[in-house]
Amino acid sequence: MFEFGFAQENITPVRGVPLCGYLNPRPNQGVLDPLAVKAAVFRTGEVTAGIVICDLCFLQGALVERLIAALKSQQVAFAERILFAATHTHTGPYTAVCFNYFSDPAYLDMVVAQTVRAVQNAAANLAPAELFATSTECATLAYNRRYWMKNGAVLTNPGKLNPEIDRPEGGMDPEIPILAVRQNGNFSLILANIVNHTDTVGGNLVSADWPGRMEREIQDQLGYDLPVMTMIGTQGNINHFNVHTNADQTSYGEAVRIGKAYAGAILSALYQLEKIDCRSIEVRTGTIEVPYFQVSDEEYNAAAATFRKFQNATLEPGHDLTSEDIARKHPYVMKYFAQKLMDCRDKAISTKRVEKMISLRFGDKIGVVSLPAEPFVEIGLAVKRASRFPFTFVAALGMGEVGYVGLPEHYCHGGGYETSPSPDTADRNTGTRLVDAAAKLLQ
C-alpha cells in the first residue's frame, strides 16, 4: 500500500536579516510573500522516505547534516532517507558563508526547528494515497544565459539587445516532470521539476520568487490550497532573461508572470497524469568527492595584475551588484573575482570535500536524484539520458551546494562568471563525476 503525508512550516525571517544571492548583503525591509519549508513523506510497507524543499537560496552539506541529526534526535527513523533541497530564491536569508557574508545563527536555529516540525507532522499525516506522474514542456520562460560574443568571448547576462551577442553557448531543458498524489478524490500534492533560475524579484524584500506565485496560481485555479512543491532542476547556466527584448525582467511582477505561466503549463498537463503502481520505494545513498579548483601560474599572474589595477575600487552605497555588473566589468567585481582566483592558491583548502547524494525510486517508473550543486543544464540532460526511469526528476541544490558546476568544455574558453575560480569552487571535472554518480544511483 502506498501512503503519503504532507506538512509545511513558515521560515520567513524577521526584518533586518540579510538576503542572499548577490555580491552584497541586503538587510530585508519587509516581506512580499512568505518562505516555507515543505515536507512530503512517502511510505510503502516498511520503507518510509521523504522530500523536503526549503524556500532558501541553498543548503550546504553542513546544514543538511545538522537537519538529519536534529531529526534523529527526535526519533525520526527515516532521517537518512530524506532528499533535502532548496528553491534557490535570491530573496531569502543566508544559510552559510556566501560572498564573504555570514548567516544569522538565530535564523538557522529556526529553520532547523521548523524543518523537524514539518517532517514530524508529515509523517503523522501518512494515509493511503494514489501516485501519478506525467511530463510536459514550457520553452518560453527559460534561456541559456551564457553567450558567445562576436569578439569570441563568453559572457553571462551580457545585457538586453546587446548588438555584440553572437549566439547562446548552449541550450536549455523545457521538460517539466510532474509528480502528483491524490487522496480522497483530490490532489494532495503537485511536485514539478523545473529548470530555471529563481532570481526575478531583486531588491530587499523577502519573497519565494516565482515558485511561490506558481503555487498560489495553481491553488486559485483548482479552488483549494493543495500543496505545490517546486524542485529546481539543473539551472546553473539558465535564467529567465530574454536578451532579444528590452522588457524589464527584474521585478515582483516578473515573478508573478513566470509563476502564472508555469502554473498554466502544469495545470494543462494534469489531464494526462499516469497512475503509477508503486508497490515499493527504494532509497539509495552515495557520496562524491568534489576536489577544489586548481589554477595555473598563468591564471594566477593575470589575476594578480587585475587586482593591482582595481585594488582601490569600492562599492557605491545602495548599489546591488548583479550578474549584469559582472558582464559590464564593474571595477569592484573585477577586484573581487581576481582576489578569489588568487585565493585558490594563497588560501587553498587542504581538507577533502565529500558530498552526499541520494535517489528515491518509486516502483519502476519514477526516479528522483539529488545533485549537490548548481549544475549546468547539460549535466541534467545527461543524467536523464542515463536514467532508466520514464519520469526522472533531478534536484539541483540537493543535499548540499558546491557552487556552479559545468562540464569540462565550459572551462576551456574562459568567460562567464559561473566558471570563475574561488577557493571553494569545484574543479573542472566535477560535472562529469556528477553525471556518473547520479546515473549509478538511478541504475
Image (cartoon, rainbow, N blue to C red):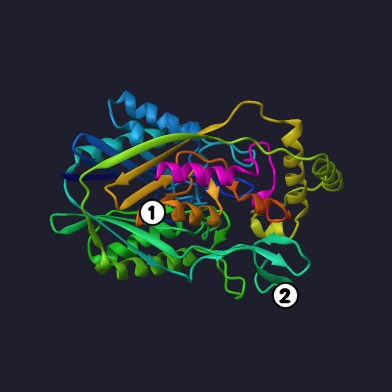
Magenta residue check for 369: no
Residues in magenta, as a range:
417-443
Q: Is residue 26 visible?
A: no
Q: What's the amino acid at mark 1?
A: Thr
Kindly identify which residue carries mark 1: 392
Q: Is residue 236 above or below residue 109?
A: below
Asked whether, in this view, residue 286 is left or right of residue 344, the answer is left
Q: Position of residue 44 (x, y in %)?
A: 20, 41
Quarter assignment of residue 37: top left
Q: What numbered label is drawn on residue 163?
A: 2
Q: Marks 2/1: CA distance?
A: 38 Å
The percent coordinates of residue 307 (x first, y second) are: 82, 44
> Which quadrant of the figure contains the C terminus?
top left
Instruction: Name the one closer to the observer, 383 or 55.
Output: 383
Dot 1: element: strand
In the image, 325 versus 391, the foreground residue is: 391
Q: Indicate the position of residue 156 as horizontal and vertical percent values.
A: 66, 60
**Residue at screen point 35% across, 56% down:** 391
At label 2, the amino acid type is Pro
Question: Residue visible at 67% across and 49% down?
Answer: 419
